[in-house]
Image: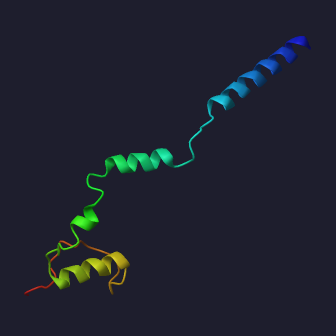
Amino acid sequence: MKTTQSVFMSLWAASCLMLVGCANDKPLGVSVAQVQQEQVYNPNATVDNKDVIPTGTGARSQVAYDVYSGQTEQGISGSLLEPLTTDE
């Protein structure tokens, strides 16, 4: 009986120590937000590039948008690298 009680007390003490070791003072998500901020090269990129107009054709952009939104008639298949028109 005494060995069972000592084993139980040892396991209880070990589990308490493990729970104390898992304590975290910071709120959840702080470390993830900090890593994201450290990985951003230019935090003002949206302000710095507001006058930049991307090049490209409207038809190409429409195909990309249709595939992205799933509004194609044939469903989502193929690649955006396929030609838009065929000369055959």
Q: In this view, does 32 lie to the left or right of 18?
A: left
List x then y, in percent, for residue 60.
Answer: 19, 80
Q: Is residue 7 left or right of residue 53?
A: right
The residue sitting at 37% across, 79% down in the picture is: 70
Q: Which residue of the protein is positioned furthest toward the left in this rendering?
A: 87
The residue sitting at 87% across, 17% down in the picture is: 5
Q: Which residue of the protein is positioned furthest toward the right in this rendering?
A: 1
The residue sitting at 22% across, 73% down in the picture is: 80
Front one among 14 and 53: 53
- Quarter location, residue 59: bottom left
Q: In this view, does 43 lie above or below 69?
A: above
Q: Which residue of the protein is positioned furthest toward the top in this rendering?
A: 2
Front one among 86 and 1: 1
List x then y, in percent, for residue 34.
Answer: 42, 46
Q: In this view, does 84 lie above or below 35?
A: below
Q: Which colour scheme is used?
A: rainbow
The residue sitting at 38% across, 50% down in the picture is: 36
Front one among 15 and 28: 28
- Quarter location, residue 74: bottom left
Q: Is residue 31 left or right of residue 44?
A: right
Q: Is residue 20 left or right of residue 47?
A: right
List x then y, in percent, for residue 76.
Answer: 33, 76
List x then y, in percent, for residue 39.
Answer: 32, 48
Q: Which quarter of the image is occupied by the N terminus?
A: top right
Q: In this view, does 20 lie above or below 28?
A: above
Q: Is residue 4 above or below residue 28?
A: above
Q: Which quarter of the image is occupied by the C terminus?
A: bottom left
Count of numbered badges drawn on the protein: 0
